[in-house]
Each structure stands twice: as structure tokens, then as C-alpha cells.
Image (cartoon, helix red, strand yellow):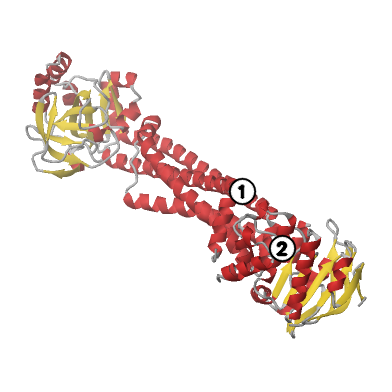
Amino acid sequence: MEVIAQQIRKEFIRAGSQTNIFTAVAPCDFLIPAGQVTMIHGRSGSGKSTMLNLLAGILHPTEGKVFYDGADLYAMKDEELSGFRNRHIGYVPQGRSAVFSLNVLENVMLPYTLYEEDGRNAARRMLERFGIADLSEVMPDRLSGGELRRMAIARALVRKPEVIFADEPTGDLDDENTEAVLDSLCQLAREGAAVLIVTHEEDAFAYADRIFAMNAGTLSQER
Amino acid sequence: MTHLRQLIFRNLVKRPVRSIALCLLAAVLSAVLFAGTCTVQSLENGFRAMEMRLGADIMVVPYAAISKKNFDNAVLLGNAGAFYMPGEYMDKIARMEGVGKISSQFCLTLTETEYCDVPVCLMAYDPETDFTVKPWILESDGEAGKSRGVVIGSRIDAKVGETLSLFGTDVTVSARLDQSDTDCDTTVYMDPETLRSIADASGDETLKERIRGYDGNAASSILIDVKDGYDVESVKNDINIHIKKVRAVQSQHVLTHAASGMGGVSRGVKLLMAAVWAVCVGVMAAVLVFETRERRREFALLRIMGASGRKISGIVRGEVLSVSGIGALTGTLAGLILVLAGNGWMVRWLSLPFLFPDAAQMAWNVLLSLLIPTVTGAAAAAFAAGRISGKEPGTLLREET
């Protein structure tokens, strides 16, 4: 599945002021091709995460459109868009991301559970793939930052999505786990997924097919 | 875990303080609504019953009765106690202008029995002239008013045809009265001859002395039905002016006082219910809004994974409905226990007739006290969920960071 953004722009109104508008993402066209790893890097506050969210269908652009194999993402109603996200998009958010009332296995199963499907076996396979199968019954508040991150990645990939977004996926990981995660994402790209990673770690660039820099909301291609 | 409802359950277990707090709020609301509604209905039922049962327009009692006991309440509860006036007063009153039907009653004593949990009044009435007891007979073997055939109030634990032993004398229950929640419910009415044999057989000198007084035509109360076309108040005033050491009271006057007392209590209870409901709505909404703000990241994650705004609302509503439902059930049970246990205390405290709601009213009250807290919880949840489910996941994530 290929993602195409056409002239997307995002503006925010600063809290407490109706007139102080700032542009988080300047108008741009963007493509996430299937079978490739695309990376965006940039400083904090440069608009990387906002760009990622616009492309992932979780934040409406102020202007512009996002197409998934020709389907206009933001023309969909909430129910349809949510279902689309569930089936086609894997998203690894920045920071700690867990439902703390569920154990690790249940967290990874959640994309299935939300639609009343049994994802137990798929979730177990993902936990094995990321080396946390022995933690399946553990509650998330007992996990280290790295384990939590691997759980979040396992959850994002459990439905074998065709498009994967990862916001600083290696932020809390040691070298060994960083390599394992990036290898997994590359493997998924080789299997045909479109992968977009937002990172500020230059070591990760070695895994990218295409690299973009984000600076004050403006996107430019470096590779 | 393959069902969303399991997620709801886990969320409740994971946040015990919130769950218990919401549950308690719903329970308090439910208990107050149930107990309050039952109280108001009991007062209204009691008042209606009393209105029907006060068959006499005027009740005359010895003046001594009012120095010992609140007179209106004595009349309301159907018993002015063991105070007596000369029997010839009845003849004097009967000859007065406007007096129609007239009948006297004589209370021998209040006594502990195995048939009732409160002292029972042994009362002689005149079956020939009576117009206030017979109309309320619920079931009868046709022997009521005859020798050894007694009429019992509804709280006395015996059936028609059974035998009661009173001070060693056996009497047969010939009739049973409808419930009134006045002292009539704990009274055994009998003909003078039966009362006399009980007093004689008791060996109790006080009772014997009282019955001797009765033989001299003493009465505890005289009940009067005013003739059509005569003003009840004028007849009452005539009695108070012309008959010494008695007090005549107009039933309607007593009812007006009782209605005013009942109205005040009812209004107070209704106000309390409204206040508790308002506080519960406010606190529930505040707790839920605060809590959903705290859980923005969790909801954002669920949205990212594909949960629609409607699903998020469903999760919040499911959580709140579960706890408020459990709370409502607990509160209703607590309310029921409170009402059953406090029934006697309420009668004593209010000194007003208090007739418990019937099964249909009770079922309706249970339904309401289950529904209102649950619906209140659902409304508060919908308010909180609306604030969170209407936001895009990207916005929630942004607010979080």
C-alpha cells in the first residue's frame, strides 16, 4: 500500500490565544512507497511527529489530502477511518504507551480485541519475535523502558499492517534492541509494507531507503 | 481477553478507588431515593388510611388524656390511652343538638402478648352502636361482637378462627381489620362482657378496679357522627362548653394538622432527594471528566489502534454503568433494610400514621432507585466521554505531551 500526501499543511492555535497561529507543517507533497523504509529526522518541535500523525490518519490537516492507494483518508467518517487504521496501519507512538490495566499479551492483542476478534496466537508470535514471550503475563508497570517499547512495536505490527509509522521507536532501547527493532521494520518493508520512521538518531539512517529532514515545519529530501 | 467488556472489567479492577467511589455515590443516591420515596409514600398512604378510618366527625376523650399525651396524635393513632370519663356523658352528649350516631369505647389496658411485638390494647366497644370498627373488617366468621368473639387489628399475629389467651382467658378471633398503621392495628376489640371476664380472670386488682369503673359506664372515648345539616365545629364547641373535664376534637381539624405535618416531612424528604441527586450528578461528572483527562494517553492509544469515538464512549459508559449499576443495586438493598428497620422508629419519631407501600408501589420504587442512579451515571459518563471521544487521537497525544 502506498501513501501519498498532497499539499498537506497543519496549523495550530497556541493555547490562550485565538490569533497566535503557528504552522507546524508547511504545505508539502509526500510519498511513502510500499516496500521501503522512509525516515524523517529533525530537532524537537520541528513538526516531525505532527507530519507522522497527519499521514497516519490521526490528525486532520488544516489543508491538503492523504491517499492510501487512492483512498482519501480524511474523507472517511470516524467509524470507517478507525476501522481502516485498525486493519491497515501500525503505529508506534513516542514514549510509554500501554494500557496499564492489561498484561503484556493482552496489550498486544488489543487491535484484535477492539473488534471482538481473537488475536491470542498472533500476539504470542509477535512477543516471541521481539523476545518478550516470557513477559506475556506481566503487567506493563513492571516492564523496563526497552521492554515497554518492544511491546508497543509488537502491538503495532500484530495485525500485519501494510503501512507502519514509528515515532522514535528506538528511543528507550539499547544497541542490541535498537538493531532488533530496526531489523524487524526493515524486514516488514522487504515483505511489502510502507514504513515511515521519525527519529533523531543518526545511527538509524543506515536502515533507511529514503531520508527527509524536517526544519521548522518544512520538509526536504536528503536521500 | 477477546472481548471489549473484559477491558472494561479490567479497568474497573485496576482503579479500585475510583470504582468504589463511584459505586458508593450511586449506592447513596439509590438508598436515599428508595428510602425517601418509601417514606413519602408511607406517609401519604398512612394519611389516606387515617382519613378513611376516622369514621367519626368528633372524638371526645377525658381531659386527663391530653395532659399526658399529645392529643392530636393520640386521636390520629386511634387510642387516647387508659384514661376514663363518666359514662353518663354519653347520654348527655347523645341528647345534644346535632349529634347523630354515637358510640363509646373503653380501653382496659395495654399489655404485652405473644401475638404482637408491641403492647396490645384491650378495648371494649359496643357492637350495637359501633360505626368505626365494623366498616374496616377485612375478614370475618360472622361472630364478631358476640361473646368471646374478638376483632383484632392487622398487626396482631393470629388468624380468624384461632384462639388467643389474654390474661388466661381464651377468646376466639372472629374478625380481622384492614391495616391502618394507627394504634387500631394493635388493638383487640371485644364486647363489654368478654372484656369483663378477662379482667375478672386476670387476678390483677388494677384491672378489676378499672372494669368496675366500666360497669359504672366509664368510657375512654366517645365517637360522634354529626347529623347532616349541622356544623361539626358548632357541635364540638357545644360539647366543650357543656361537658366538663372532657375535650372534644374535630377529626377534620386533626387531619388538617396531620396533613400539614406530613406535607412538611414530605417536602423535606423530597428536597433531600433532589439535593443528593444534584450532588451525585455533579460529583460523578467531575470525577469522570477529571479521570478521562488523566486517561487521555490510554484513549489516544486505543483510538490509534482503531477504536472509534463511539467505542471509546462505550468503554467509558460501560465502566460507569457497571459501577453505578452495582451501586444502585447495593443502595436499593440498603434502602430496603433501612426502611424496614426504621419503620417503627419513623412512626414514633413522626407521630404520624405511616403505612408501608404495597407490593406494586414497592416494585416501582425498586425500579426507580435502580434506574435513576444508573441513568445519572450514564449521563455523567456520556458528558465525560463526549469530551474525550470527540477529539482526534493526534490532538489527545499532543495534549498529553
Q: Nearer the viewer, residue A68 or A199?
A: A199
Q: Nearer the viewer, residue B314 or A129?
A: A129
Q: Are marks 2 and 1 on the same chain?
A: no
Q: Residue furthest left?
A: B147
Relative to residue B216, is residue B186 depicted above or below? below
* Residue that extends furthest to the bottom in the rendered view of this protein: A70
Query: What is the chain identity of the residue bearing mark 1?
Result: B
Determine which residue is flagged by label 1.
B282
* Mark 1 neighbour class, 10 Å CA radius: few under 14, some 14 to 19, many 20 or more: some
Which residue lies at the image location 64% right of the left edge and 57% below the top edge?
Answer: B384
Spot occupied by residue A55 in the image (x, y as percentages of width and height): 78, 74
Compared across the picture, whether B165 is left or right of B155 comes to left
Q: Position of residue A110 (x, y in %)?
A: 62, 66
Query: Is residue B217 left or right of B253 when viewed as pictured?
Result: left
- Please identify the quarter of the rendering in which residue A196 is found: bottom right
Q: Give how far across and how far down residue A32 sits, in percent.
A: 81, 79
Q: Give the side of residue B121 with respect to residue B381, left or right.
A: left
Residue, disc 2: A150
Give A87 or B184, whichever is nearer the viewer.
A87
Q: Position of residue A89 (x, y in %)?
A: 70, 74
For mark 2, name the chain.
Answer: A
